[in-house]
Image (cartoon, grey):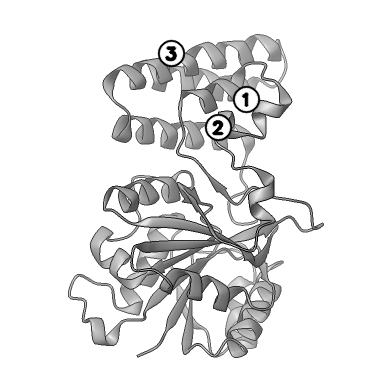
């Protein structure tokens, strides 16, 4: 039985995938973990598949004919690994590591995540400390979204509130600690999950496309009684956006569609109504600020208002 299976989902990631896979494989080689790496390509139109096939023959490659998205891509990898509804524990890895293609794994990250995950029976997920490509700090974990976070999307908010609990952030000094700290959810860029968590919660909900998938899964994991940790000593560079970039107007619609689904799934009725009203007021404010500029973006904002009213 292997210790760790890694799943990477790509879409037009040719410019970043070599560094991502090479740094990952180098770290796995020195980790002492028995491991395997799976890559699901979601119908890239660039050279991603060719690069992986030629330079990384040890990586198990699945090339999709259509762009199935982040959640479905990872679910496909989980099925290939063996989580297919007829799970035989003896044949499954102890853990699965979901890793974005726009990442660079620093030495020791995989082992430290694995050790933190296995140190306690009630820990189900571990995520790394992330930095941007220039080394700047990046928030790696968050509190579950609340009405306050919706407020900060649209209305003036003191800067110190944006960086703190009011906006769902954890204090920066927690990332400087040598000890893991408990969080509501980690970014989907690095999620290492215990085998039993996957067996119990069954992966991503594919009703979410491109946004909020990891939040929904983390909410279900927490409700099932598991703890989620951020592990500051496990360092991964996360460039951000290479597999999710798309036209800004379209991204606004997709983002708020997923957020609405999240609110409808986990908020009580009064909070769902309040969230929708905040969205409507906020989008109207954005429309006024645009004036006559950017008609395509204005159409996207109007579409979000329509979704919030239904």
From this view, report whether residue 85 is shown above or below residue 205: below
From this view, report whether residue 90 is shown above or below residue 281: below
**Around disc 2, counting alpha carbons within 10 Å, would you say few (fewer than 14), some (14 to 19), or many (20 or more)?**
some
Pointer 2: what residue?
252
Residue drawn at (50%, 36%), measured in percent from left and top? 255
Q: Give the x, y percent position of residue 42.
A: 48, 63
Residue drawn at (48%, 15%), measured in percent from left and top? 278
**Mark 3 vs mark 1, CA separation in Å:** 20 Å
Front: mark 2 or 1: 2
Q: Is residue 65 visible?
A: yes
Which residue is farthest left?
A: 86
Is the Cβ of the residue at disc 2 closer than 8 Å to that at disc 1?
Answer: yes
Badge 2 or badge 1: first in the primary sequence: 2
Taking depth in this image into account, of 80 and 155 the one nearest to the observer is 155
**Mark 2 vs mark 1, CA separation in Å:** 8 Å
Badge 3 or badge 1: first in the primary sequence: 3
């Amino acid at each position: 039985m292997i210790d760790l299976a890694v799943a990477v989902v790509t879409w037009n990631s040719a410019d970043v995938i070599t560094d991502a896979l090479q740094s990952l494989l180098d770290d796995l080689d020195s980790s002492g973990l028995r491991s395997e790496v799976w890559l699901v390509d979601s119908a890239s139109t660039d050279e991603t598949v060719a690069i992986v096939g030629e330079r990384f023959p040890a990586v198990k490659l699945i090339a999709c004919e259509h762009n199935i998205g982040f959640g479905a891509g990872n679910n496909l990898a989980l099925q290939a690994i063996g989580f297919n509804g007829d799970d035989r524990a003896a044949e499954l890895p102890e853990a699965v590591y979901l890793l974005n293609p726009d990442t660079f794994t620093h030495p020791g990250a995989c082992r430290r995540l694995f050790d933190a995950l296995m140190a306690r029976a009630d820990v189900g997920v571990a995520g790394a400390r992330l930095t941007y490509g220039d080394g700047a700090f990046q928030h790696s974990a968050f509190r579950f979204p609340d009405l306050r976070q919706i407020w900060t999307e649209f209305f003036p908010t003191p800067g110190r509130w944006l960086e703190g609990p009011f906006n769902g952030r954890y204090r920066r000094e927690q990332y400087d600690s040598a000890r893991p700290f408990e969080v509501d959810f980690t970014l989907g860029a690095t999620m290492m999950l215990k085998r039993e968590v996957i067996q119990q919660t069954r992966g991503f909900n594919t009703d979410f496309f491109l946004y909020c998938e990891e939040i929904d899964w983390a909410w279900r994991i927490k409700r099932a009684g598991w703890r989620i940790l951020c592990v500051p000593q496990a360092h991964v560079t996360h460039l951000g956006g290479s597999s999710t970039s798309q036209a800004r107007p379209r991204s606004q619609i997709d983002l708020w569609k997923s957020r609405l689904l999240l609110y409808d799934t986990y908020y009580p009725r009064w909070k769902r109504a309040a969230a929708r009203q905040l969205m409507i007021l906020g989008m109207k404010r954005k429309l006024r600020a645009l004036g006559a500029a950017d008609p395509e973006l204005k159409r996207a904002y109007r579409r979000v208002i329509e979704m919030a009213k239904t």
